[in-house]
Image (cartoon, helix red, strand yellow):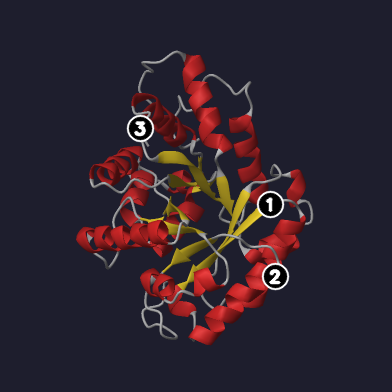
Amino acid sequence: MKLAKASAYPEGRVLEALFELAGEASVEVAPRQVLAESHLSSLLPAGTRVYVPFGPKADWTETVEACRVLAAQGFEAVPHLPARAVPSRGQLGEHLAALREVGVEALLLIAGDQDTPSGPFGDTLEILDSGMLETHGIHRFGVAGHPEGHRVASAEKIDHALRLKLQYAQMTASSMWIVSQFAFDSARIIAWLERLRNAGHLVPVHVGIPAPASLKTLVAYAAYCGVEASARLLVRRPGAARLLARWTPDGLVRDLAHHRLRHPESLLRGIHLFCFGGIEQSARWLRDLRSPSADAELGCTPGVA
């Protein structure tokens, strides 16, 4: 990662912007880790929005139970709903009913990783068109964003789909936001945010960032999630020792704070932290960022320590 540039703003304003971004931060935690973590409420503030991913070969009952546990601990559980993993319209109704029973009020709608749909839903628009969210009283949902582009869909197709999703939100008086795939390059993220606004997609955006982790872990997740271009920034310097180093998102989030200061009209509303299994170190980093006494040098070093 590049060094953060000298600030054009007083350090107090930068720290305030960082604090605001952290205040809107959400985290992503796998259902099994939610169920295994007995003291999650001691790691994250009450009311934190916790996204529950649904990976390949996942068990929906685990997702529902994880959401129940999160709600009981005072968090807002937001499960992923991958359209292509839903085998039938009836099953979608059962999934939504089960989630509502444990207090879920919002979803993250994604198409899903599998190439061939398990049932009638090929993408998130078809989930919305089914009317099932309205039937089950769900009027809050997030959709995925891709700062580095999508593996399959063109930018034009993504823009068209986003317009239709916004139309659905307006017609149903629903609240909609974007949660982006994680990336490491602040310039790409900021350019994407500006492109969204210039295209008229006036929707709140929560930017996905990787939590502190080893570079080896991040490169593996980047390859799996299709953000190899950004991950290459982490491995430009050769040497096995570098793969043992650790990434921290300090410089990245500081760049986002500067963007907010320069562009108060930005769509950026907060950050979304991908924990990659390390919830304790992720929570510690987020707690430090939320502290009003945060180190004034935050982000003045590269993202690799």
Marks 3 and 2 sit apart, C-alpha to C-alpha, by 38 Å
> Of label 2 and label 1, which has the lower sequence position?
1
> Of label 3 and label 2, which has the lower sequence position?
2
Q: Where in the figure is residue 59, as x and y percent of width and height?
A: 62, 77
Q: Which mark is residue 75?
A: 1
Q: Where in the figure is residue 33, as x and y percent of width and height?
A: 67, 61
Relative horizontal placement of residue 283, taking residue 111 as reference (left or right): right
Please identify, in this view, whether the residue under mark 2 or under mark 1 is nearer the observer. 2
Quick check: can you spot residue 289? yes
Q: Where in the figure is residue 165, as x and y percent of width and height?
A: 36, 61
Task: Identify residue type, mark 3.
Answer: Glu
Q: Is residue 115 above or below residue 165?
A: below
The residue shown at (25%, 44%) is: 195
Which residue is labeled 3 in the image? Answer: 265
Relative horizontal placement of residue 83, taking residue 64 as reference (left or right): left
Marks 2 and 1 sit apart, C-alpha to C-alpha, by 15 Å
